[in-house]
Amino acid sequence: MEGAGYRVVFEKGGVYLHTSAKKHQDPDSLIAGVIRVVEKDNDVLLHWAPVEEAGDSTQIFFSKKDTSGGDSCTSEEEPTFDPGYEPDWAVISTVRPRHRHSEPTRGAEPSSPRGSWAFSVSLGELKSIRRSKPGLSWAYLVLVTQAGGSLPALHFHRGGTRALLRVLSRYLLLASSPQDSRLYLVFPHDSSALSNSFHHLQLFDQDSSNVVSRFFQDPYSTTFSSFSRVTNFFRGALQPHQEGASPDLPPAPDDEPEPGFEVISCVELGPRPAVERAPPVTEEEWARRMGPEGRLRQVPELKARIFSGGLSPSLRREAWKFLLGYLSWEGSAEEHKAHVRKKTDEYFRMKLQWKSVSPEQERRNSLLRGYRSLIERDVSRTDRNNKFYEGPENPGLGLLNDILLTYCMYHFDLGYVQGMSDLLSPILYVTQNEVDAFWCFCGFMELVHGNFEESQETMKRQLGQLLLLLRVLDPPLCDFLDSQDSGSLCFCFRWLLIWFKREFPFPDVLRLWEVLWTGLPGPNLHLLVACAILDMERDTLMLSGFGSNEILKHINELTMKLSVEDVLTRAEALYRQLTACRELPHNVQEILGLAPPAEPQSPSPPASPLPLSPTRAPPAPPPPADTVPQPDSSLEILPEEEECADS
């Protein structure tokens, strides 16, 4: 139905207000009405209005669900109605609706006493939706607004709750509360909803407001206690509880009362394809792609080869400069030489800034003094079992120290955060040159500096994305981890923070990173690497009877026991399995780079689907690689001796 400035996108009759909480209803206590979802201007409204009674009031549909599934109950039959909700929901006469505008309705005149019950509410004002208990005569929904008030309970005498929720799911994200299966929390429907969900933990427990901050300061201890609530919230936001509720299904017929509803559907994945890794790119192959002026040719094909096979060790010193953006893939040999000269001057000017600080100046510069102290401590224990860094007076340690202090001059807002030395060490080992190592390190930090930001928003987002991928790939594993208070996946925190630097032997880290730096087959391959490791360990975890402590201990003990080639093979197979699914959820497509990120929330209704709801739109071209945000200088989670005292 269209009108001037508005459009009705959903309409359902047989939706009643019950104005009495008595078990035995009389006709005068029921107000028949129509529920509509209306797009008006830049807003979306939920609108209910009564309809005129036609004829005798005894014909006002005392409809009950009979054993045949029909809607039959004669006017002579006295219904035994159990409202199924608490008194504060039932006595709606004490909570009069706040009136907004009313669109033209096919029903009561404004002067009608029953017409005073009409209401409209913007979807953006909703805070939660409470559903009825299963098995009631009529399913009902209660809408709670952000202001804390509840609107009158809407009783669907002829079914339609599921159909309504399908429509609402176009505009909102509905997340099941972990503490009340009948309560659905309402969030703006965009790709940042999971991150926003941390704010709403206060709905569940008064002590939950600082759970996230405590976790990101000390994830290994917090995960054993209250951070499990984040697990449950993620699960409620993403988990499919029932079958048969796919948003693609047709609306339930009018004669089917619905005791419950669900708006999140499972994803059916096809078989996992076989994947074979290729041999590494050799110096000879690299040279064949070099043009007469020293320009690389067929760069996309070259990147694909690096992704599928990595690089020969002797080639890394040259190729990493391209992978990390220090040298341009399109530049000539002469252009590269000029660029290196320029960057060398720039590096030593920045190094001179901290080198020329006198002891008296540094005494008054607590920030620089703090950076220097933290760097010296971390450098002294970084990769000391590697021959390049072993020994008390090793020159490699001095270069690590100087490069990290110079990076503080380069990016003073970020400075130094624990874990950065782990990222620099392999780069310096490969390049064997202070200046080259610095600029390659800067290129790496452009990819991951958000991991070190003080707010930890990037880490929250990645943990949420990892959970979403794992939920699609392996719901039983997610359920098991969740049952053991490990569903937050916080044991993956270090994996994501420093890109598995401490999980693989040093040579394997070099291979893993150069594959990830290609940006193929899409952004966030590191999340699929994490999924691959968990997939390899799923039987051990699920058949062992591990609790949360044992799960964390087992994950920590995987260090240096993983094969990078096996993990990369499985990660690519998972990627292909996901991308072959024609009904892959839109936000999973975003993670994999198959669809552009959702636009920021605007007053007009977004078209992106609900998490884990199928989308049949063809994949869009991959977006540019994510530019990620910055770090917490107090983060003390990396040293092995501090990782898990409880385990």
Image (cartoon, rainbow, N blue to C red):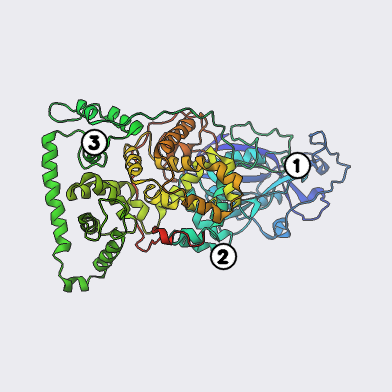
How far apart marks 3 and 2 lie (CA) works out to 56 Å
Give the label, 3 or 1, closer to the camera: 3
x and y percent of residue 260 in the render?
69, 43
Question: Relative to residue 251, is residue 40 depicted above or below?
Answer: below
x and y percent of residue 530 in the render?
45, 43
Question: Relative to residue 391, is residue 326 depicted above or below?
Answer: above
Question: Relative to residue 328, is residue 142 depicted above or below?
Answer: below
Question: Relative to residue 133, is residue 286 depicted above or below?
Answer: above
Give the left or right position of residue 304, taking residue 321 as reference.
right
Disc 3 residue type (three-letter): Leu
* Residue at x 37% of width, y 46% of height: 505
- Secondary structure of the residue carrying tag 2 is helix
Badge number at residue 315: 3
* Residue at x 51% of width, y 36% of height: 585
x and y percent of residue 394 in the render?
22, 57
Residue to which mark 1 is pinned = 53
Image quadrant holding the N terminus, namely top right
> Is residue 178 among what the camera can see?
yes
Compare residues 76 and 587 and report the one nearer the observer. Answer: 587
Disc 2 residue type (three-letter): Gln
How far apart marks 3 and 1 lie (CA) works out to 83 Å
Q: Earlier in the sequence, mark 1 or mark 2?
A: 1
Give the label, 3 or 2, closer to the camera: 3
- Furthest-right residue in this view: 76
- Secondary structure of the residue carrying tag 1 is loop
Residue to which mark 2 is pinned = 206
